[in-house]
Amino acid sequence: MKVEVTHHVDASDADENGHHDYHYEYDIYRFSNGLDEYVARSYIDAPQEAHFLSRVRLSRAILLRPEDLKTALFAAAAAHLRAAGKARLQWLSEETGGYLPLDNG
């Protein structure tokens, strides 16, 4: 499994006092096996959490389905995040359009 981690900052322009209307800082994790890729995000202010966002195949990102959670690549990605201290994992469900907890047991 190939793992790529990139750091991102999404923020409004600072006002004259250096304050932002919004400021989000997070890491994006990409786990790939050459065919599929799972993408997860972890916000810096919640270091114990990570959220799986999508599966990418042939450059096309799609929301996750329950069967995605059963693949060897997904299991390896979840194990990697847990080993990095991400005790609370969630996934963005295609069916519900919202985040669901990943069984952390």
Image: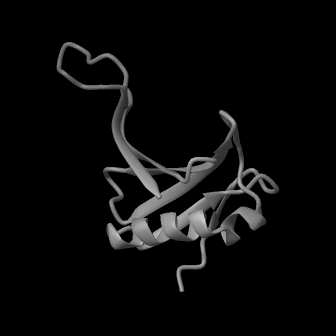
Colouring of the image: one colour
Displayed quadrant of residue 87:
bottom left
Identity of the residue drawn at 32% across and 16% down: 13
Q: Residue furthest right?
A: 95
Please state which of residues 95 and 72 is positioned toward the viewer in this rendering.
72
Q: Residue furthest front?
A: 34
Identity of the residue drawn at 41% across and 67% down: 80
Q: Residue furthest left?
A: 17
Q: Position of residue 94 (x, y in %)?
A: 77, 52
Q: Is residue 85 left or right of residue 31?
A: left
Q: Residue furthest top?
A: 16
The quadrant the C terminus occupies is bottom right
Identity of the residue drawn at 19% across and 22% down: 18
Please state which of residues 78 and 71 is positioned toward the viewer in this rendering.
71
Rendered view: 67 above or below 39:
below
What is the number of callouts on the image? 0
Q: Is residue 101 left or right of residue 47?
A: right
Displayed quadrant of residue 10:
top left
Q: Position of residue 6 (x, y in %)?
A: 35, 40
Identity of the residue drawn at 41% across and 65% down: 81
Q: Is residue 84 left or right of residue 77?
A: left
Q: Position of residue 71 (x, y in %)?
A: 66, 68
